[in-house]
């Protein structure tokens, strides 16, 4: 029961965090927003994780964490680009379907066993994404349908590769892995911001820093990570916490519906449920 209750933390916070990120993507520079959220999350997470112990520094693991975090930063920025052009309730489920790619990589490259649930999960996610792609949006709903879908699908590929590297890098206790992952994320976010945002870096960063909403976004992202890590520790199997956390896009879509009055077509809502259902099936 404790593991299930703890799993509700990432379900709620990650869903809310994606909603805040979507709001920011439409109003701020995404490179500055990404770096700010990573910094705030790290300042919150790392001190807590260090209370449990410090990580050992191994060259191979550090390199793998840096590679994984590079993909995470890239995937998040690509998802933010999708949020600019399409409904939050569609972009979030597709971009968060990274379990599809991680599962395929583990089967093809790592030789993991294929079970019926895996096949069903993959087919359901693909069907959901296909249904969204061929659904007819309401007039004026999308700024750019093609860019929305391309960014969302590209994000799920990038995230999926990143999680594969994260699995290889995570050889220590959860709190040690958290510290290394967050610090690697800050390093990559900083260099991406420095290299790719060539104008108004400090101005945009200061503008974001004046908005309390983005502090909340960074903090709750960290809370979700800590909640999921704790849920793993108190659960007999990681499948249940992972499956519960995988439903976070439903929270994102609900917030977009309640706060922004984002109304999707019946076909789009059904497709969203299919995608989330497929993610949960893969997690189990």
Image (cartoon, rainbow, N blue to C red):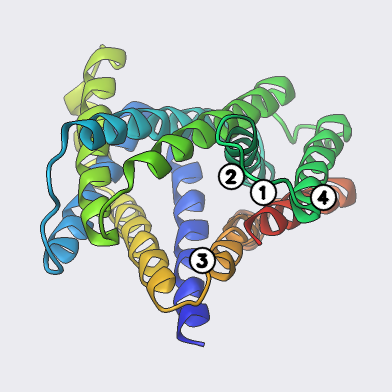
Which comes sooner in the sequence, label 1 or label 4? Answer: 1
Q: Which dot marks residue 96?
A: 2
Query: Which residue is found at the position 20% from the left and 27% from the top?
Result: 203
Q: Report the residue marked by disc 1.
A: 89
Identify whether 166 is placed above or below 50: above
- Do callouts 3 and 1 mark residues in contact (Cβ within 8 Å)? no
Specify few, some or many for label 1: CA neighbours under 10 Å numbering under 14, 14-19, or 20 or more.
many
Q: Nearer the viewer, mark 2 or mark 1?
A: 2
Specify few, some or many for label 3: CA neighbours under 10 Å numbering under 14, 14-19, or 20 or more.
some
- Do callouts 2 and 1 mark residues in contact (Cβ within 8 Å)? no
Query: Which residue is found at the position 72% from the left and 31% from the top?
Result: 142
Query: Which residue is found at the position 88% from the left and 35% from the top?
Result: 135
Q: Report the residue marked by disc 3.
A: 238
Identify whether 220 is placed above or below 37: below
Which comes sooner in the sequence, label 3 or label 2? Answer: 2
The span from disc 1 to disc 4 (Cα, nearest Å) is: 23 Å
User: Element at badge 3?
Assistant: loop
- Do callouts 1 and 4 mark residues in contact (Cβ within 8 Å)? no
Which comes sooner in the sequence, label 4 or label 2? Answer: 2
The span from disc 2 to disc 1 (Cα, nearest Å) is: 11 Å
Q: Nearer the viewer, residue 252 or 4?
A: 4
Q: Report the residue marked by disc 4.
A: 120
Q: Nearer the viewer, mark 1 or mark 4?
A: 4
Q: Position of residue 258 (x, y in %)?
A: 64, 63
- Image quadrant in which you'd find residue 128: top right
Q: Nearer the viewer, mark 3 or mark 1?
A: 3
User: Element at badge 2?
Assistant: loop
Identify whether 158 is placed above or below 245: above
């Amino acid at each position: 029961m404790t593991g299930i209750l703890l799993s509700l933390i990432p379900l709620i916070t990650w869903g809310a965090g994606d909603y805040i990120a979507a709001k920011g993507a439409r109003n701020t520079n995404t490179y500055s927003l990404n770096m700010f959220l990573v910094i705030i999350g790290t300042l919150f997470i790392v001190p807590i994780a260090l209370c449990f112990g410090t990580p050992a520094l191994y060259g191979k693991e550090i390199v793998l964490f840096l590679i994984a975090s590079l993909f995470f930063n890239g995937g998040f920025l690509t998802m933010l680009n999708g949020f600019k052009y399409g409904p939050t309730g569609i972009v979030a489920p597709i971009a968060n379907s990274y379990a599809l790619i991680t599962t395929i990589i583990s089967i093809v490259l790592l030789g993991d066993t294929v079970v019926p649930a895996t096949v069903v999960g993959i087919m359901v996610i693909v069907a959901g994404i296909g249904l969204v792609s061929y659904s007819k949006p309401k007039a004026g709903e999308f700024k750019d349908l093609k860019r929305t879908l391309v960014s969302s699908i590209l994000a799920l590929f990038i995230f999926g590769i990143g999680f594969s590297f994260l699995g290889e890098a995570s050889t220590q206790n959860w709190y040690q892995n958290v510290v290394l992952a967050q610090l690697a994320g800050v390093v990559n976010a900083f260099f991406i911001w420095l290299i790719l945002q060539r104008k108004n870096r400090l101005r945009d960063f200061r503008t974001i820093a004046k908005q309390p909403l983005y502090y909340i976004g960074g903090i709750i992202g960290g809370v979700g990570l800590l909640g999921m890590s704790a849920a793993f520790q108190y659960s007999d199997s990681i499948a249940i916490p992972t499956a519960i956390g995988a439903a976070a896009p439903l929270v994102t879509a609900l917030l977009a519906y309640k706060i922004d009055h984002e109304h999707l077509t019946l076909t789009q809502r059904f497709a969203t449920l299919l995608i989330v259902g497929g993610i949960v099936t893969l997690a189990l």
